[in-house]
Amino acid sequence: MSAYVFFDILEITDQKIMQEYGHRIGPTVEDYGGRYLVRGGKSDIVEGDWHPVIPVIIEFPNLEQAHAWYDSDEYKELRALRLDAAKLNAVFIEGVT
């Protein structure tokens, strides 16, 4: 069952570091069977008062692969970079069967 990693990047505090992160993250996602579905873009709010700032959605084959990517040595290094350069919310969501 597919799983989704959803990030809402609320604030970028260091653009240079985030550019490096952005250039390096793609291969790590692909190595774990992931693919980007959303990387920013326009949002149309039709109900409620939530306003995503920079939404990112990554699809993985299953929740286990999503966690394997997030906890991998390759991504841990990038995650440390990102933690110094941005504030965000993140959630893992399991898809429907």
Image (spheres, rainbow, N blue to C red):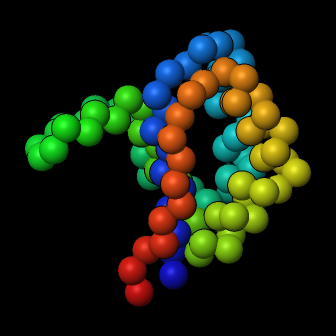
Left or right: 51, with 32 as reference point: left
Instruction: Give the percent coordinates (x, y) of residue 78.
Output: 77, 37
Q: Residue at x 73, y 47 (%)?
A: 27
Q: Which residue is drawn at 46% across and 39% down?
A: 8
- Residue extending furthest toward the front: 49
- Residue extending furthest toward the bottom: 97
Q: How many marks?
A: 0
Q: Residue 28 or 69: which is nearer the viewer?
A: 69
For residue 21, say whether it is visible. no
For residue 1, say whether it is visible. yes
Q: Quadrant of residue 83?
A: top right
| Vertical order, 35 against 21 (above or below) | below
Q: Residue 91 or 61: which is nearer the viewer?
A: 91
The C terminus lies in quadrant = bottom left
Q: Residue at x 28, y 34 (%)?
A: 51
Instruction: Give the percent coordinates (x, y) of residue 49.
Output: 19, 38
Q: In which quarter of the image is residue 22?
A: top right
Left or right: 43, with 74 as reference point: left
Instruction: Give the percent coordinates (x, y) of residue 82.
Output: 69, 30
Instruction: Give the percent coordinates (x, y) of residue 14.
Output: 65, 13
Q: Which residue is drawn at 78% across and 57% down?
A: 71
Q: Residue 50 or 67: which is nearer the viewer?
A: 50
